[in-house]
Amino acid sequence: MTDTLTKGYEKKKNDLIGKLLDLGIFKTKNRQLYELSLNELEDTYRQLLQGS
């Protein structure tokens, strides 16, 4: 079960990183995207969609 959750978490994280890269975002707050948590990636993506 844990392995499935980890794979799901990593897939979601990688999908968001891909979407951010497609939008031209390579780093944020002086950190590379791969260093961000899933929540931070989701917040960054949400802010971009809202135009903030």
Image (cartoon, helix red, strand yellow):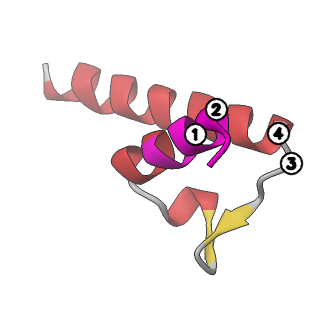
Q: Which residue has dot 3 on it? A: 24
The verdict on residue 33 being magenta is no
Foreground: 29 or 7?
29
Residue type pointed to by label 2: Leu
At numbered mark 4, what does the secondary structure look like: helix, strand or loop? loop
Viewer-side label of 2, 4: 2
Vertical order, 9 against 47 (above or below): above
Whether residue 14 is visible: no
Task: Residue 5 in the image: state x and y as whole percent.
Answer: 24, 25
Task: Report how far apart the C-alphas of labels 4 and 1 lie in the structure.
Answer: 9 Å
Answer yes or no: do the residues labelled 1 and 2 have beta carbons within 8 Å? yes
Q: Which residue has dot 1 on it? A: 45
Q: Which residue has dot 2 on it? A: 49
Whether residue 40 is visible: yes
In the rendered view of the protein, which quadrant contains the N terminus? top left
The segment highlighted magenta reads 43-52
The verdict on residue 49 being magenta is yes
Q: In this view, does 7 lie to the left or right of 35?
A: left
Q: Which residue has dot 4 on it? A: 23
Label 2 vs 4, first from the N-terminus: 4
